[in-house]
Amino acid sequence: MRTRSLPGIALGIAITLLPACARPPTDPADVMTGESFAGHVRVLSSDAFEGRAPASVGEARTVRYLTEQFAALGLRPGNGNSWTQDVPLVGITGTPTALTVAGSGETLRFEPGVDAVLFTKRVQEQVALEQSELVFVGYGVSAPELDWDDFKGLDVRGKTLLMLVNDPDFAASVPPTGGAASVPPQGGAALAPSPFGGKRMTYYGRWTYKYEEAARRGAAGVLLVHEDAAAGYGWGVVTGSWTGEQFDLESRDGNAGRAAVEGWLTHGAATQLLAAAGQDLAALEIAARSASFQPVVLGLKASTAIANTIRRQPSRNVVALLPGAEHPEEVVLFMAHWDHLGVDPAHPGDDDIFNGAVDNATGCAALLELAAAFAAMDPRPARSIAFVAVTAEESGLLGSKHYAEHPVFPLAQTVGAINIDSMNIDGRTHDVVVIGRGASQLEALLERAATAQGRVLSDEDSPEKGYFYRSDHFNLAKGGVPVLYAEGGIDLIAGGAVAGRATSERYRTHDYHKPSDEYSASWKLDGALEDMRLYFAVGLELAMGDAWPNWHAGNEFRAARDASRSAQP
């Protein structure tokens, strides 16, 4: 699209709303059409919406468009009398000094952006580590249900923890794709089977969990050892994602409960640091794959300081409700994130607007289409259906995190949730890809609906990258709500899996998080429409039934669901 040829805010307001369905169809799913879906995408991803950045003119236009569309369909404000939920964002731009490590007879120096990426979530003008004792804690996992504890009772308060990314099964099951890497032991007895489930990353493998676990234990600092394959991305992604202004939710205590300094070390820097302590990183990586691993006090002290510029900028989630006819207190939830990356005047080339058409104007368009289909039902579904468009997904799933911590509808009364993040624009498929397949009983409903379409469920191509933990449903999962994150498959009816993987890779390489992610009339929307009908069928079964789905036994979120449901009268 053109570069910011915007005639002012009036353009955003003057955009014509798409008409709600004029008549209830025989099948409510017939309300959903490729034409109306495309119309929503064209509006939301237009230059007038300036890339839909939180706390921008683009947010104001996006929130207005979504609420007016929901209202036109006959839905009600979902948050009491309001269509929105306030989300208190705070932006922190940190300027770190070098990380110095002393205690080995020499002082090592690791430069920000080169050897280390350092930041803080604390809303303070200055944070620091001052001669903080360094401890290697393996993968930093404490999982009582798996009889796994990398801390073994060690008091880590005030210390700086060095951790491996991913979880203990990873190094034994996936060959490295870049950077220095762990290797399986050569000769000797084989490692005992791990309880972490093989190649697929678990919750304990995500960097978010590791920072949170360090904070729970009172650590002053936490540094993750980067390795391309284990993280699922290269060092460039780390430097690009964790430098510059970082957004977070601001708690009442100014996020004082977080570690003062969080960050990453390159694999080479970590190797050098551990060598100064007389330790070998490759050997420690092997040792950390066993439940008998013991934390290693390194005899080294870490120091750094970060000066922060702080900017508070509130944002909003959009919440719409179709009340249930019989059990309005029981809620089926559909969600999608409305935000994208906004405008970057420094971006090279002629286009500086990140329109975010696929990611995630398509998800918002699907949310509106599904709302239209359910609103057309007469009589209404027995249970309530909520449609939640969340903010700040691109900043770390912050809108959904705020919703999960301050739910408009109690999580214990949320029957299940379906997350929609980037719809299929490449045509119909033989399969449906389930992210994190095998997690919850919702997949049985999805399989029934897919079978009715002549389709099959399939696994994601790269389960070790942990995509299940990288979209908004994850925050509801942590609260125990069974969630479903499924996408259009990879096996295209026109071209098969080879063509499907090629189109997917083309998008990731050329358009993902780039200004070129724009609407095109060449999109093949029959696949998106088929997927929307799939989501509708799953939601309808939940909304018309009386079942309370759960996570499968052994899943890391099962205990939270059991606890919340058992507390219900």
Image: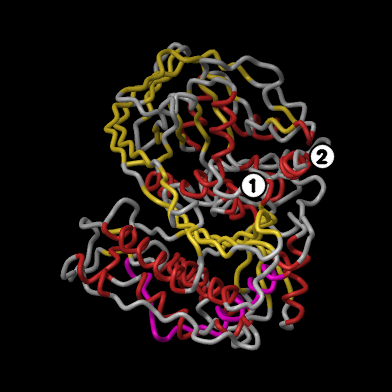
Q: Nearer the viewer, residue 157 or 561?
A: 561
Q: Quadrant of the C terminus?
A: top right
Asked whether, in this view, residue 527 is left or right of residue 110, the answer is right
- Residue pictured at 55% horizontal, 85% vertical: 526
The answer to whether residue 531 is above or below residue 543 is below
- What range is drawn magenta here? 515-540
Residue type at numbered disc 1 = Leu
Q: Position of residue 16 (x, y in %)?
A: 32, 78
Q: Nearer the viewer, residue 238 or 49?
A: 49
Write down the quadrant of residue 98 in the picture.
top left
Position of 368 relative to 132 (above/below): below
Q: Which residue is mark 2?
A: 190
Relative to 222, is 410 on the left or the right?
A: right
Residue 42, image x, y percentages? 37, 77
- Residue tagged 1: 411
The disc at residue 471 is: none
Nearest-to-viewer mark from 1 and 2: 1
For the point 35% across and 74% down, which residue is it? 43
Residue 186 visible here? no
* Spot occupied by residue 233 in the image (x, y as percentages of width and height): 50, 51
Q: Secondary structure at mark 1?
A: helix
User: Is residue 518 found inside the magenta-colored segment of the image?
Assistant: yes
Under mark 2, the amino acid is Ala
In this view of the protein, can residue 496 be seen by the observer?
A: yes
The N terminus, quarter of image: bottom left
> Residue 197 colored magenta?
no
Residue 312 on image: x %, y %: 31, 38
